[in-house]
Amino acid sequence: MKVVILTGRELRHTFMRKAIALDANIEVLSSYCEGSEKSLLNTAKREKNDTNQLTHLLARENSEKDFFETFVKLTPDNSNPSFIAKGEINDEVKVQEIKALNPDLIIAYGCSIIKEPLVEHFEGRFLNVHLGLSPYLRGSGTNFWPLVNSQPEYVGATFMYLDTGIDTGAIIHQIRARVFKNDTPHHIGNRLIADVAKTYIDIINYFSELEVMKQPEDMKSGKYYKNSDFTPESVEQLYCAFDDGLVEKYLDIKEKDKAKIIVNTRLKEQLI
């Protein structure tokens, strides 16, 4: 399967593209890696943001190093990276480059919002992973907010066909985060990203065999979050929830009582 990857340039993005490109059945024609100049962490540093927010974001960065840095340093890079500025992926030159590559699939993770020319050209072959469970949560930080709201059963990832909306494409498959005793928010999030890489590889390899899944009635019915919602108060609420035993309480919840997710039959077979 020949693919093009659209992603970012932070450690988790590098891990993802390198992991996908290591699969023997996947040829990555090119990876377009956007800059991190507009990331929450860099924005917080520039603006000398609230200490709680900056501390949280720096802890996430350090946790990513624990999870992904050794893999990134020791594995070969078969992903053919091309480093571009944030938002440049929608420039006409880049759009034409990608069209000329003629990939079987385009794989998106952590890139800018993609505009119509590219989406329309690769309709049905343009995949995205949303780190959150649609339609329950859309927008940004959608695995941060379930923890803030003491609802860890809503932490997960949604693999979908990309459309021109925000996290509104047809869902292919969903996974829920694995949570263990003594986890921090960043343990949960980075373990999920590692699981996303394995699942993305399976989706690419079994793409022609995937079942068309029944969709939620309204993909815009959930809560929509913006970067501006990420406040000092929300960070404080997050850590108060963990101090109050959020993880331990969640581990006592039975599977049948958790948020319903869409599981593609063909992918479920790979887990058995």
Image: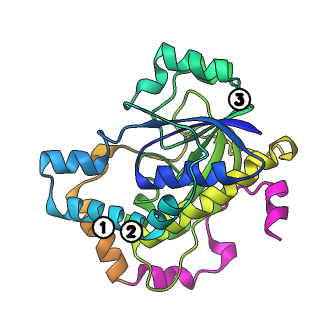
Cα distance, mark 1 to mark 2? 6 Å
- Which span is picked out in magenta? 245-272
Query: 156 left or right of 223?
Result: right
Which residue lies under the disc numbered 1?
A: 59
Residue 176's disc is none
Dot 3 falls on a residue whose secondary structure is loop
* Picture quadrant of residue 35: top left
What amino acid is found at the position of numbered circle 1 in the picture? Ala
Which residue lies under the disc numbered 3?
A: 103
Cα distance, mark 3 to mark 1? 37 Å
**Viewer-nearest residue: 32 or 80:** 80
Which residue lies under the disc numbered 2?
A: 63
Q: In the rendering, at what x and y percent does residue 216 appear?
A: 68, 45
What amino acid is found at the position of numbered circle 3 in the picture? Pro
Q: Residue at x 79, y 68 (%)?
A: 271
Q: In the rendering, at what x and y percent does residue 166 appear?
A: 51, 35
Nearer the N terminus, badge 3 or badge 2? 2
Specify whether residue 135 is in view.
no
Q: Residue at x 57, y 51 (%)?
A: 18
